Every structure is written in C-alpha cells, then in structure tokens.
Image: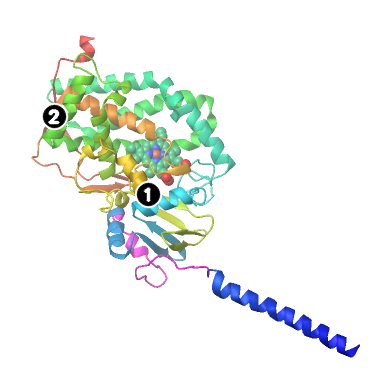
C-alpha cells in the first residue's frame, strides 16, 4: 500500500515536472517575447517633455527636420501625453492599411467647450455609431457624388459671378488679391448649399465649424495659381483649356475629367502646399508600426507635408512638376506599398470634402487661366508660408492684375 502511494507521488511529481519543463521550453524557444520597443525619441526636457519642439510657427517644417534627423517614426511626449509622429510614406501606408479602425478617432476631449465645436461635433466624435450616422447624412446630403450633382447649378452660377468680377477688374486695370476673390467664391457657394440643406437637417449645424475652417484651407490652396509664374506650365495649361473648352464658353466642372493637366497642376499644388499639413489621430489599442510599438491612447500626428516631400518616394520633392501626376504614380504607390499623396488624409476619417475641393480648386484655376493673363508686380513671387489657425497660407498674399484674354465668353453666349 505504502509502495503504491510512493509510486503515485513519483508519477505525479514527474508529470508536474514535465509540465513545467515544456512550458519553459515553449517560452524560451517558441514564443516570441512581446517587443514593446517604442519608436526613437529625441532628447526631452524634464516635465514638459518635447513641448519645446512643437512650439514653432511652421511646425510641419520643424517636425520634418526632426524626422530626417531621428527617424520617420518618432515617439514624443508633451507633459505626460504620448505622441507618435509619422513622417514617411511607408509608415503612413502601414498605419492606414493595417490599423485604420484602431486609429479612426481623434482623441479630442468630449466636452461641449472643446476647441472643435463641442462633443456633438462630427470632427471630435469618436469612431462609432454616431460618427457613422453623421457621415452618412453628410455624404448623402452634401458631399457625395449625387449630392454634388444636385448642387452643380449653384456652383456654376457662382463661377460665372467669379469670372465677371475678375473681368470687371481687368477692364478697370485693378489689382486683385487672389486669396480674397477665391475665398468669396467658396464662401458664397458653401452658404448657398448649406442654407438650403441646414433648414432640413438641423444636426448638420455641428459640422459647420469644420466646413468653415476647411473652406478657408481650400481657398488658401487655390493660391497655387501662383505656381503658374513658370511660363511653360501656364502655356501648357492654357493650351489644354483652349483645345478642350475653347474660348467661347467658360470652363464648367463637367470639363474637369477631360483636363488631365489641370488636374495634375491642382494635385501638385496640394502636394507642395497642403492646407492641412499635419493631422491627428488617436490609437484605441496598442499596435505595431514600422517595427515599433505604439501604445494605446497615443496621439498619432501625421505630417502630410513631410510625407509628400519624402525624398525616398518623390523625385525632386521640392520642385513644382505637375507631370508626375500624369504618369503612373498611383500604380507606383501600390507597388511601393507607400501612401505618398495624402493632402486629404486617408481611411475612414479621411476628408469627406475631397471631391468638392477638387471641383472648387480646378474650376477656379481653370477660370483664372482660361480667361486672363496675370501681371505680377514682382519678378519672383514670395512663397513664404504661415500657419493661420490650423491651415497653411501665404505670408504675403498674392496680388496681381488680370488682363482679359478674350471678350467675355459669358457675354458672347
Ligand atoms: C483643399 C481643401 C481641403 C483639404 C486639403 C482638406 C484636408 C483635410 C484633412 C487632411 C483632413 C483630416 C483627414 C484625416 O484625418 O485623415 C480633413 C478632414 C475633414 N474635412 Fe477636409 N479638406 C479640404 C476641404 C474640405 C471641404 C471642402 C470640406 C467640406 C465641405 C471638408 C470637410 C472635412 C471634414 C468634415 C473633415 C473631418 C472628417 C472626420 O473627422 O471624419 N474638407 N480634411
């Protein structure tokens, strides 16, 4: 009896030993240790962390310099809040392809006094049912393809008014501040459409703040007309407009698909001068990006300005070369597994106003180049930038005088 008990005890002991031994072997040889290595981090100061690095007027540029020195994914800290800074097309590809849902909130404080129009605002809403509902309302009523078709007449009328206004100034030989003119165009269009819609959908009111801010951003971008001081670009653009649209009628937004060079010029302008050079997301859960660990509840700052000038993916990144968008750049992007063109962000929280923005910018530049020659006071336009609010603008607003190329085509019609 005693002998049997001893054998049972021995068997039990061997069994337990084997279990522990196998567990040890599994942990040592098979299970990969979880790697919590954070992205590289520049030297930080006590208490404030990296705050001093973010206090620059042109923050997108100083962060671009920082990333080229320390790495294209960086870990920063402001007081105790962690930030991961993304500055390369390949890292952007990874976060938007593999972690889009995880980073589809912005992490703004959920208070009525929040900087971005309160807790019920579309922009500050976390990714969830409310956000999805609002996005559907927004796309169906304002920004989707069908909604944009319905509001086409409003934009066409405003474009005629825009042209007439410039024509009058040309006749009087008056100087025009481009930004102001284009801002007027977008504001009036925006209000005309929003007023009608808002009477029907009261909840859209909360989105209006973002609209205002973005229309502002969009109109800044339109200053890219300045890039046409390069005569060969203007000449090519005008030739395209003359052959597709002619000189007896004004460009319409339905002409845009037939104007590839104009589209390329707009894209190149947005690449070099993205109105929203940096945008923010927030990680709900920890995830791995670029070989590093991004902890949960971390703000992710995407420096679109740096991504779109990433020398690894763009030849002559600082040059204005619209032709690059005529080629197979989208195919290249897929092949290289990179997201190199992100002026409107990407993924579920990407800009819903992208199509409208392309229409506004394309038609406004179209009218300015089709209808007028532009006389600049200075030989060289001052391209210095300044961040106003959250959007990028020209430090010295562009002023020039229009000279009508043809008799007013609206009168001819
Ligand atoms: C040139 C013009 C514009 C640019 C460059 C631009 C850029 C952007 C960017 C970078 C974002 C953040 C995207 C992300 O996090 O991935 C954004 C978001 C947004 N944009 Fe725009 N935008 C423009 C015009 C517009 C217009 C015309 C509208 C509406 C009429 C608009 C409405 C919005 C809204 C509502 C959001 C927030 C989306 C969300 O949180 O889910 N934008 N935009």
Q: Quadrant of the C terminus?
A: top left
Question: What stretch of residues is rendered in magenta?
Answer: 33-59
User: In the displayed structure, does residue 55 sit left or right of residue 247?
Assistant: right
Render colour scheme: rainbow
User: In the displayed structure, does residue 239 sit left or right of residue 116?
Assistant: left
Residue found at x 82% / y 85%: 7
Residue at the right extreme?
1
Can the viewer see residue 213? no
Q: Quadrant of the N terminus?
A: bottom right
Task: Specify the label residue 235 is tagged with.
Answer: 2
In the picture, residue 356 is in which quadrant? top left
Residue receiving disc 1:
337
Q: 70 or 352, which lies in front?
A: 70
Residue at the bottom extreme?
2
The majority secondary structure of the magenta stretch comes to loop
How far across and down, in percent of the image, does residue 320 sit? 19, 42
Please rate how many residues cluster around mark 2, counting C-alpha atoms within 10 Å: few if below 14, some from 14 to 19, many from 20.
few
Is residue 170 placed above or below 220 in the rendered structure? above
Residue found at x 51% / y 41%: 121
Is residue 333 placed above or below 204 in the rendered structure? below
Q: 330 or 17, which lies in front?
A: 17
Can the viewer see residue 354? yes
Which numbered disc, 2 or 1, marks the residue that appears first in the sequence? Answer: 2
Residue at the left extreme?
379
Q: 35 or 18, which lies in front?
A: 18
């Amino acid at each position: 009896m005693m002998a049997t008990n001893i054998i049972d005890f021995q068997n039990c002991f061997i069994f337990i030993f084997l279990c522990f031994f196998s567990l040890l072997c599994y942990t040592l040889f098979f299970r990969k240790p979880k790697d919590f290595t954070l992205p590289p981090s520049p030297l930080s100061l006590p208490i404030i962390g990296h705050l001093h690095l973010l206090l620059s007027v042109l923050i997108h540029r100083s962060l671009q310099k920082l990333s080229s020195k320390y790495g294209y994914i960086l870990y920063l800290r402001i007081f105790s809040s962690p930030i991961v800074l993304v500055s390369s097309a390949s890292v952007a590809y990874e976060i938007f392809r593999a972690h889009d849902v995880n980073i589809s909130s912005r992490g703004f404080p959920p208070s009525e006094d929040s900087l971005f129009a309160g807790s019920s605002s579309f922009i500050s809403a976390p990714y969830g049912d409310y956000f999805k509902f609002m996005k559907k309302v927004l796309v169906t009523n304002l920004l989707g393809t069908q909604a944009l078709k319905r509001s086409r007449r409003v934009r066409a009328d405003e474009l005629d008014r825009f042209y007439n206004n410039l024509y009058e100034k040309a006749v009087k030989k008056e100087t025009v501040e481009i930004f102001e003119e284009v801002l007027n165009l977008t504001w009036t269009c925006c209000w005309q459409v929003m007023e009608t819609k808002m009477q029907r959908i009261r909840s859209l009111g909360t989105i209006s703040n973002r609209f205002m801010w973005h229309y502002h951003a969009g109109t800044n971008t339109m200053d890219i007309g300045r890039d046409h001081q390069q005569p060969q670009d203007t000449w090519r653009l005008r030739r395209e407009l003359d052959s597709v649209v002619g000189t007896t009628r004004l460009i319409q937004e339905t002409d845009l698909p037939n104007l590839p060079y104009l589209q390329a010029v707009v894209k190149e302008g947005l690449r070099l001068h993205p109105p929203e050079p940096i945008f923010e997301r927030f990680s709900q859960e920890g995830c791995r990006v670029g070989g590093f660990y991004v902890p949960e509840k971390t703000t992710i700052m995407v420096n679109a300005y740096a991504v779109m000038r990433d020398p690894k993916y763009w030849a002559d990144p600082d040059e204005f070369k619209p032709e690059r968008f005529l080629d197979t750049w989208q195919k290249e992007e897929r092949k290289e597994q990179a997201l190199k063109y992100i002026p409107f962000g990407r993924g579920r929280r990407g800009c819903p106003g992208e199509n409208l923005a392309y229409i506004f910018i394309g038609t406004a530049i179209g009218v300015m180049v089709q209808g007028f020659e532009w006389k600049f006071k200075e030989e060289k336009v001052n391209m210095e930038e300044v961040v106003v609010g959250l959007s990028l603008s020209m430090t010295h607003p562009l002023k020039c005088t229009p000279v009508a190329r043809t008799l007013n085509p609206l009168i001819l019609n």
